Every structure is written in structure tokens, then in C-alpha cells.
Image: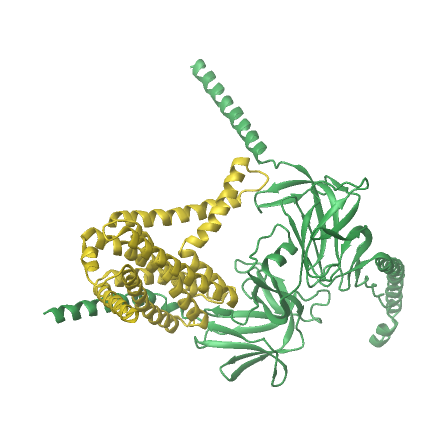
Chain colours: A yellow, B green
Amino acid sequence: MAGKELSLSIHTMKALAKRDLYSTLSSWGIYITTFVSFVASSFILKNFLGSIKGDDILISADPLNYPLFISTIIISFYLALLSAISISREKDQGTLEVLFYGPVSSSSYILGKYIKNILTYFVVVLFFLVYFWGVSLLTNMGFSSRLGKAILTSIFSVSCVISFGLFISSLTKKMRNSIIWLIGVLILFLAVEVGQTILLGLPQGEVSSILTYLSDTLSVVSRGANWISPFSYLSRGIDAISLDNSFLWGLNILYSIIYSVILLVLSISILKRKGVRG
Amino acid sequence: MKIVKCRFVLFSLTLIIGWVFCLATLSGAQAPELREQLVYGLSVFNGRGYTGGFTPRTEDTIYLMADKNNAISARITLVYFWPITGKYVAGFQALNEEVEGVLEVLKGEKVIKTLEKEDNSRYYPEGYYGEACLLYKGEEARAYFEKFMGAIEEYYKQIAEYQQAQIEYEKNFNDFLEEIKERREAGEEIEKEEIEERMPREPTPPSPPQFYVTPPTKDYVINLPLGHYKIRLRAEDGTIVQDSEKDLVLFTCRREGGTGYGIIPGNRWTRKESCDDPSWIIYAAGENTLYFNPFIQDEYNELYYNKLEDPQNRGREEGWKWVHIKSIEDVTLLFSKGEEILQRIVRLPYYVEQISGPELGYEIVEFDPVKMPDRQPTFEGYKLELASTLQKTSYEINMEKEEGELFQGGKREIRLVRKEKAKWLYILSIFPLGVGLVVFVGRRRLKS
């Protein structure tokens, strides 16, 4: 009986993921976002090439990793947005209620959405491979194994971003609220990081006690935000690659998986608790 | 008219006075605030030699190399913040008061060592500007300093003798010239060989001692195994000196005996580059002249090593960095493309010649001791010239100990990039839109 239920759940999950994936790949959004991310990468790479003067040299381990990082951030933001509106939109339109009359459970629904977004990113990874291979061929910058490692890292980091988007979406009822929440939270993460950087730059002996207190508080908040912000998993992964620290890299992948699992479980339980109209 | 003129003068005066006051206020705001602080003066081993520095109150931890002699001293000085570098600076010239007491080293809460101040000297076997340096303590430090002072005294004695010999030489030379002149005037034919044989020889100036030893100073010499400790200063009255407690981290290298390259680009010889990790790639675009200097290197924790060099430096605890320890000199540099060796390069001395003109302002030439008798080579290295005619592809450099025997870890990749193709990158970016268009058209066709 349990096996049959599981098989049904998997089937539902597959059907949902397939339906949504087809819809995403048929729309222009993913292609335009990938194009925008590649334009940004091309701009960075053109500047890198421009910085190698005719009679000068530039030493770098992974010149393609930074453009990849920027491209991944842009695409992650799009996928986060897509995830954030995915549940709330269907709640808003009433589609979710209709779906739940059928053999759709909270877990198969959330996992279906997650798989669809991950598969969408796999398509983007194919684009990445073609683009960076093309870059390497055109400019002779080299497609290194570290770039491959960075692309692999990006899959786990994007998984965090998607789970984060789904989590936000499960909390909100309206699509508009999901977007506001997502952008608001991301701006908050950014503000904490920028604020801490500014306060850290001030000389210790010269700042007032209030600023010292604020700096200490921000430092604690920032440490916490580094674990909550899905984007920090990508920067940590890229850092581990540039440091050539396999242990840190592996640990970051493990943390990304744990982060994704926690947020997916939370999203499922919130959806269960709130119901299809909540 | 007069009133207007008067008002104008008054207005100008007010402006000038205001401006002067403004400047005074501004300069007052820029004056750094001096604070009296207990700091630790450092003379620490960095893998190659000894480096100096100080730990201000803002730094809680001192980083030292394990199982090496490191000298530290507690001093009261004036400290101020220098915004340009973002670091605290010690005004030792204004105030440099030695703090008396003993230095306690704690492991956990237990005092494991109590250090008294002891004499120590730094010994530079290649001279003061050489990087190699050893620290001697106690009797050995005094003995080395005495040896150095003896060598200096001997040198001064030789200088005095040389000066005397020089005076005599000049006198003899003048007498010789006079004699030749008189004989010539008397109609005597003098052979060139005779002149060369009888001409007084100029004395050779003595060479100063090649090594250098600093005068012994009294510091706490710390030599501890790997680990985390605490230090504090106990005053003569038995109390702990305020602000003297610091954490102490003793560390060592993670990997040793690696191979790194210092690279001097011909167009900016004062700003060297490093290619320490085999995964680092050297990107070049056109015609380059590169001078390679291979090194034996050790790998240290980035944060620990940066803090050892200057306690106010920053770094990442999870990061690692290679530190050049010793130059590799007895090898040949190979420049190759795939299996084919394009060039075998030997190490040569080079001299940077200052030239006037709007271009670089200097020229790097091969050092010739015959043509440049009174000069020293600026640097030594392996000169690699990348011609503009080289195919824009990947090349390799490596080191060869003896023919066919390669130096481990010496391989690096040089990539000549195709800058002219940079504009094509934007065109390449369009391809996802192309894929989107194919999907869109395919879908439309399916629907119809």
C-alpha cells in the first residue's frame, strides 16, 4: 500500500515537473535571462582581455570563474523569483486547490516544483558549457577543470536558491507578496553585508561605543545571514575552488544539500499546515 | 566710491582670514590622535629570515613560527592611526620605554614557561640587505657581535692603510710622471714596455665585511612547539601588567619544497608578479619579455603568515599562500609547445640602465662585468622573449636540472590570448536567444 502511494507520488511529481518544465522552456524568460547573464559575462571577459596589455602579462588561475559566478547569480535570481511566485501564483489563481483535489500531495507538489527548477538549471548548465567552450575557443583562455568544478558547485548553490524561493512562496498567499518578500529579504542580506564592511573599515580606536556595538551586532547578524542567504553558498563554493581547498569545497556542497533539504521540508510542512488557500 | 572700496577691502580681508581659519581647522582635524600604549615589539622568523614589527593594543593575537627563535619585547610607546594605510603606527622615536618584568607563557590556564630578557642579535650572512638572517642569543649573540665589530675594526684599519697607500701611490705616480717628463725633455726615447713596468700600481681598496650583526638587545626569546598559547607580562611587584595579555599562535608550513616563479615583466621591472601554484596560468597578449626567477617555496596559512609579517595585516584562515624561501639557480628553463622544446634558457645577470626619454625610462641589459666594472647586476633571471609572431596558443615553461631531468613542480602554462576576438563574445552571448527562437518556432509549428 505504502509502495503504491510512493509510486503515485513519484508519478505525480514527475507529471507536475514535466508540465512546468515544458511551460518554462516554452517561454522566453529563461532564454532572455541566460542571454543577459552571458552579456554580463562577456563584458567582464572583454575587460579582462583588455587589461592584458600588449607587452604585459596577467596571472590568474580561473579567469572564467568570475564571469560564471556573475552569470549564476543572475540566473539564480531569476529562478528564485520563478520559485517564489510558483506556489503563490497557483494559490492566487486557485489552480492549487484544483490540483489538490487530485492525487497531489504537499510533498509531491513542492518536490515537483523543485525538480522542475533544477531541471531548468540543468538546461542553463548546457548553455554554460557551450558558452564557456566558445569563449575558450575564441580567446584561448582555457576551459579548466576548475571551471567544471565551479559549474558543479553552481548546481548545488542554485538548489539552495530554488528552495529558498519555494520557502518564501509557501509562506505567502499572493504573488505580489512573494516578490516583495523575496526582494526585501535579499536587500536585507545585502544591507547587512555592506553595513558590516563599512563598519569593519573604521579604525577600532576611533569609533564611538554605539558604532562598536552596532558593528558587533552586525557581525553576529552577518554570520547568521551567511548561513541563511542562499547566495552565500555560491560565493563560499567559488572561494573554496579559488583556494584549492577540496575539504571546504566538499563541506560547502554538503551544507548546500542540508540547506535545500531543510527549506524543502519546511515548505512542505507550511503548505500542509496552511492548506491550499492559506 | 571710497566706501565701496573700503567694503571691498574689508570683504576680501574677511575672506582671507576665514580661509586661513578654515585651513587651520582642517589641518587640526587631520592631526592624528596619539595614544600611549603597551605594545609588543617583534623580531620574528618568516621562513627566510627575520622581520620586524609591533603588535598594537587592537590586535589580540601574536603569530609566530613554531620551533624557531623569535624575539619580542614589551614597550610603552605612542600609537596613532594612519588612515592612508588603515593601520596603527608606533612613534618609537617619540616614546620608547622598556617595560620591566618577566614574560609568562601559558598553555590553557597553566604557566608553562617564565622567560627573562636575554641578549639576542641578528646575523645577516649576506650583508644587511640580504634576506638570509639568523638569530643568536646569549653568549653566542655577544660573540657574533664582537666578531662583527672585530671585522669592522679590521676594515677601518685596512681603510687607513689603503688611504696611506693611496697617498703614497699618488706621490710616486707624480714623481714617475715628472721623471718621464724630464727624461723626454732630455731627448731620451722611452719604451712603452718600460713605462708599463715601472709605473706605480694603484692600491686596491679593502672590501667591507660581507656579513652584518646587529648590536645585542635584551628581549624575550620565544621558541615553542606548534600550538595555541597565551602570554602575559608579570611586573617586578608580582602584578600582571595591564594590556600585556595576548594570545599566541605557533604555526608551521603545511607543505614545503614547492616550486614557484617570480616574474619580472620587461615593461615594469619594479612590479614583480608571482606564479606560485601550478594551476596558475600566465596570460599574455603580444610581444613580451619576461624574466623568470624560480624559487623553492613553502606553503603557510594565509592569515597566520600575513599576521606574522605584520600583526595588522588581514587574511583568510581557510586560505593558504606560498612563500618564496630560496632561489633556484642551477637549472635551465625550458620553453616548449607540446612536446617540442622551443628554447633552452640559462640564468644570466641583468642590469637596469636608466635612460632619458618619454618611454619606460630604463632599459634592461645583460650585465657585463668588463664593461660595467664599478656596478653590480640589478637582478638575475631567465629571460624569455615571446615574439609577436608566436602562434596564439598554449605554451609551457619548465625547469631542467640536467639534460632530460625535469625539476618537480616547475611546470607552468603560458597562454597567448586572442584579444582581437573579444568583440565576438557578445555575439556568442546571443545563442540562448537563438535556441529560444528555435523552441518558439517549433512550438508554433506543432500547434499549427
Q: Is residue A147 shown left or right of residue B229?
A: left
Q: Residue B307 falls in which quadrant of the image?
A: bottom right
Q: Position of residue B54 (x, y in %)?
A: 68, 49
Q: Is residue A48 shown left or right of residue B141?
A: left
Question: In which quadrant is the N terminus of chain B drawn?
Answer: top left
In-front residue for pair A137/B69: B69
Q: Position of residue A114 (x, y in %)?
A: 31, 62
Instruction: Identify the residue at horizontal 61%, vertical 50% (top origin).
Output: B312
Q: Position of residue B383 (x, y in %)?
A: 58, 73
The residue furthest front is A1
Instruction: Identify the residue at horizontal 75%, vertical 48% (top origin).
Output: B73
Note whether B16 is above or below A239 in the view shown: above
Q: Residue A122 falls in which quadrant of the image?
A: bottom left
Q: Position of residue A172 (x, y in %)?
A: 28, 49
Q: Is residue B117 shown left or right of residue B93?
A: right
Question: In which quadrant is the C terminus of chain B drawn?
Answer: bottom left
Query: Is residue A44 in view from this perspective?
Result: no
Instruction: Identify the residue at horizontal 60%, vertical 61% (top origin).
Output: B301
Q: Residue B315 falls in which quadrant of the image?
A: bottom right
In-front residue for pair B224/B59: B224
The residue furthest left is B448
Q: Is residue B368 shown left or right of residue B208?
A: left
Query: Is residue B326 in view from this perspective?
Result: yes
Give the tally of numbered discs: 0
In-front residue for pair A65/A86: A86
